[in-house]
Image: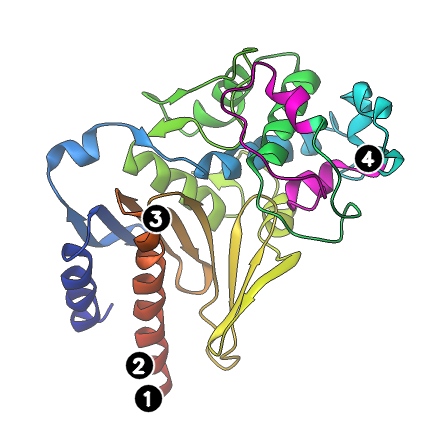
Amino acid sequence: MDKELLDRLEKKIKDIKVEAFIINQGERQIFEYSKNKKVKEKPFKVYSITKTIVSLLVGILIDRGMISSLDTPIHNYFPEILNSKNAMKKEITIRHLLTMTSGMEVNELEGNKDWIETVLNQPLLYEPGTTFQYSSGDSHLLSGIVQKVSGMTVSEFAEENLFKPLNINEYSWLTDPEGIHIGGFGIRMKPEQLMTLGYLLLNNGEHHNIRIVSAEWIQQMTTPYKETKTEEQGTYGYGYQIWTYTSSHHNQPLSFYCASGIYGQNIFVVPKLKLVAVVKSQLKLEDQGLPRIYFKELLQGLENNMQTT
């Protein structure tokens, strides 16, 4: 990795409230910035990175045949939605929840007693499957489905089938008032634990030669189903509860995917470079995209170097 590019990255992140920025390539750490020791040792709020973890749990259920199809209507799990005045709600599927295309209005969940009921009662603004709307409500319904299908709390299922096999401990996961683990946010983890999750994605669902989730699921999960923003260098999209970036430089494509949380929490995975990066931040809303911009600039610098050598 080009030292000049990494030095430039370090200078930029020191100028903002990034608390930790770690980059591993292969099995080797090539860059680390930490505000202090406590940053690495204390679990922190990962916010919407929780969504990506829920997607992995859905994939495990799919792999085991406990969910037969992503095109299963969600009324199989929440029959109360059939009482809706809008008959089109019965067409919402698990796939629509994963891709944030349920079509239901996005509203705040906190402050309500029954979060599942609150989401299901939202007006349908768009035909299911047609329009991307970023929604923690869709993610929370996925968490409810994981609980119903597994017969366990979501945390118990995750502990047994994801976290324990990955040697992830000392985490916590908040629940809604009804005791369902929050699908859209609510997990606390350490940076090194996020790195482990990043490697699971990079290695197509394997951890130290142990299969956790199928390679097919990781491939589907990280495929962009909806484009969300196009720029000269590439296109942002959304897969199954994870963001994607497809580079437009086809000769040396440095595309990546990213689990992201508000205020600048990130897991970046760059398959071509076998690279995983983790970011912990406490940024203002208007600055929360800066770690992604700086990371993309790093990749652009690498791409330019590759083209001139």
Magenta residues, as a range? 91-119
Q: Quadrant of the C terminus?
A: bottom left
Q: Separation of disc 4 and disc 2 at Cα? A: 50 Å
Q: Which one is earlier in the sequence, the residue at label 4 or at label 2?
A: 4
For the point 22% across and 27% down, which residue is it? Answer: 42
Please report contact status of discs 3 and 4: CB closer than 8 Å, yes or no.
no
Q: Are marks 1 and 2 in contact (CB under 8 Å)?
A: yes
Of the two numbered discs 2 and 3 on the same chain, state the one appearing first in sequence.
3
Q: Is residue 139 left or right of residue 27?
A: right
104 in magenta? yes
Work out whether mark 3 precedes mark 4 in sequence or the reverse, and give the earlier one. Answer: 4
| Residue beneath disc 2 | 305
Secondary structure beneath label 1: helix
Q: Which mark is residue 308?
A: 1
The percent coordinates of residue 2 (x first, y second) are 22, 71
Question: 266 left or right of 55?
Answer: left
The three-letter code of the residue at mark 2 reads Asn
Q: Which residue is mark 4?
A: 89
